[in-house]
């Protein structure tokens, strides 16, 4: 196991040291679609907006910062509500909508993987530390709370914690980039009350643009 | 060696005394002072009596006060199923006049058993079929009135002879003009070993 880690990190730093292809600072902005892989019974889709900033123009500088904002599309579910009022149906099924907002700030480094003749390049981004906030807003459509009680209701939740993430970036046509980015679920205490949803682990697919500056010739 | 064992025993004993039971009270956003309506066996019951929120008492060692579910034999054609629990005011509101217990009574057949009890799941009893009692703290008396009860979910996860029932339901009622009980909800876990039917 020790050997594995030694070779892994040796390879990682060997590659980053000798094969840093983009020897300039840059800011890139990308957007796309993301799918949550941690909630198997619900489909949390988001529109992620990602900003990466690599401040160093040093060819060996591989560290960068990343901000991710995930704008939620509504996840649908159902909840059952019950009443004692004999004039009303004793049980109704309510449409439940859950919106999971995500903001993450991470720090990481880039590992060069490949470059072709047309200077298109492939990178592996490893972000071993990030701080993230996930905020869930739950709403039951047409809920008559004066007459009905929802059994085991979902409730709003907002938590801040840490995460790790990893992405593969393909830079092409000089400034364009494609990114496949996987974030871990939030590492935070969710509380004791059982909820039907879990922290989101978004798998993001984004397309964006690199703004290079401080180019080194 | 003996000293070590004794010390370990003392530490374990202290840990046992310092361990805390959980209240399992999760507030309902729409009904201040009441718990959410759950079916997790939290042994929590809340209700408004004349608009004041009541809850079953909590002890750090024993946890939430448990309900008593029992069948009362009568001389009539039916026996009575009694579900009762202690209550206290939830929160800091002060009240000179308060209640200490609630009891729901439902007529059941003489042959009522645990399978019949499971079959109550999903059944609603209106005030013509069920009654309610409120026990008052400092007056050795009980007030009786009518109740509406809805056993929303009764289930067990075991087929063993000794099993646990989780009971979730809604109730309301009134004791004449003295007390109006509204928005009652319970989530109990009861062992079959504690039942007399």
Image (cartoon, rainbow, N blue to C red):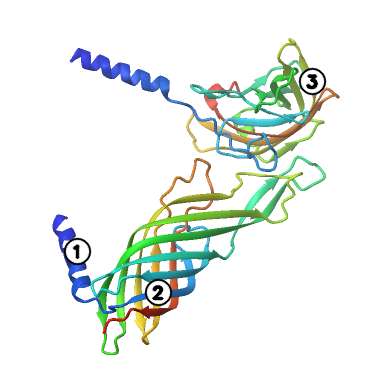
Task: Kindly tell me whether residue B12 is visible in this rendering.
Answer: yes
Answer yes or no: are tags 3 and 2 on the same subunit: no
Marking on residue B46: none
* Mark 2, residue position: A27
Q: Secondary structure at mark 1?
A: helix
Q: Is residue B187 above or below residue A21?
A: above
Number of the front mark, 3 or 1: 1
Answer yes or no: are tags 3 and 1 on the same subunit: no
Position of A118 compared to B47: left or right?
left
- Rounded to the nearest angstrom, the CA distance separating label 3 from label 2 is 74 Å
For the residues labelled 1 and 2, say whether their Cβ atoms are less than 8 Å apart. Answer: no
Few, some or many residues within 10 Å of mark 3 (<14, 14–19, 20+): some
Q: Chain of mark 2?
A: A
Q: Secondary structure at mark 3?
A: strand
Q: Secondary structure at mark 2?
A: strand
- Rounded to the nearest angstrom, the CA distance separating label 1 from label 2 is 28 Å
* Mark 3, residue position: B144
- Residue farthest toward the bottom in the current orientation of the protein: A118
Q: Position of residue A139 (x, y in %)?
A: 64, 54
Upstream in the sequence, badge 1 or badge 2?
1
Q: Position of residue A102 (x, y in %)?
A: 50, 60
Q: Nearer the viewer, residue B37 or B77?
A: B37
* Mark 1, residue position: A8
Q: Quadrant of the N terminus of chain A?
A: bottom left
Q: Residue at x 54, y 58 (%)?
A: A100
């Amino acid at each position: 196991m020790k050997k594995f880690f030694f070779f892994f990190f040796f390879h990682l730093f060997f590659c980053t040291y000798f094969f840093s292809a983009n020897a300039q600072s840059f800011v890139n902005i990308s957007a796309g679609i993301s799918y949550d892989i941690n909630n198997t019974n619900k489909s949390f889709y988001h529109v992620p907006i990602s900003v990466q900033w690599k401040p160093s123009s040093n060819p060996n500088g591989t560290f960068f910062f990343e901000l991710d904002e995930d704008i939620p599309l509504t996840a649908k579910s159902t909840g059952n509500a019950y009443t004692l009022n004999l004039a009303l149906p004793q049980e109704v099924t309510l449409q439940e909508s859950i919106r999971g907002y995500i903001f993450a700030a991470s720090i990481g480094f880039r590992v060069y993987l490949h470059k072709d003749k047309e200077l298109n390049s492939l990178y592996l981004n490893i972000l071993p530390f990030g701080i993230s906030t996930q905020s869930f807003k739950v709403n039951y459509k047409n809920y008559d709370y004066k007459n009905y009680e929802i059994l085991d209701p979902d409730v709003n939740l907002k938590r801040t914690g840490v995460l790790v993430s990893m992405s593969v970036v393909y830079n092409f046509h000089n400034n364009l980039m494609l990114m496949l980015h996987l974030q871990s679920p939030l590492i935070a205490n969710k509380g004791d009350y059982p909820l039907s949803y879990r922290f989101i682990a978004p798998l993001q697919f984004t397309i964006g643009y690199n703004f290079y500056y401080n180019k080194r010739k | 060696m003996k000293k070590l064992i004794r010390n370990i025993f003392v530490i374990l004993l202290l840990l046992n005394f310092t361990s805390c039971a959980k209240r399992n009270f999760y507030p309902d956003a729409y009904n201040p002072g009441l718990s959410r309506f759950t079916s997790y066996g939290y042994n929590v019951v809340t209700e408004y009596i004349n608009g004041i929120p009541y809850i079953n008492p909590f002890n750090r060692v024993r946890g939430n006060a448990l309900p008593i579910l029992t069948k009362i034999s009568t001389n009539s054609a039916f026996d009575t199923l009694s579900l009762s629990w202690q209550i206290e005011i939830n929160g800091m509101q002060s009240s000179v006049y308060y209640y200490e217990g609630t009891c729901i009574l439902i007529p059941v057949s003489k042959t009522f058993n645990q399978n019949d009890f499971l079959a109550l799941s999903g059944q609603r009893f209106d005030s013509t079929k069920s009654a309610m009692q409120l026990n008052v703290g400092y007056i050795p008396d009980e007030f009786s009135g009518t109740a509406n009860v809805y056993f929303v979910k009764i289930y067990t996860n075991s087929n063993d002879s000794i099993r646990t029932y989780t009971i979730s339901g809604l109730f309301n009622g009134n004791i004449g003009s003295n007390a109006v009980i509204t928005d009652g909800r319970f989530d109990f876990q009861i062992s079959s070993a504690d039942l007399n039917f």
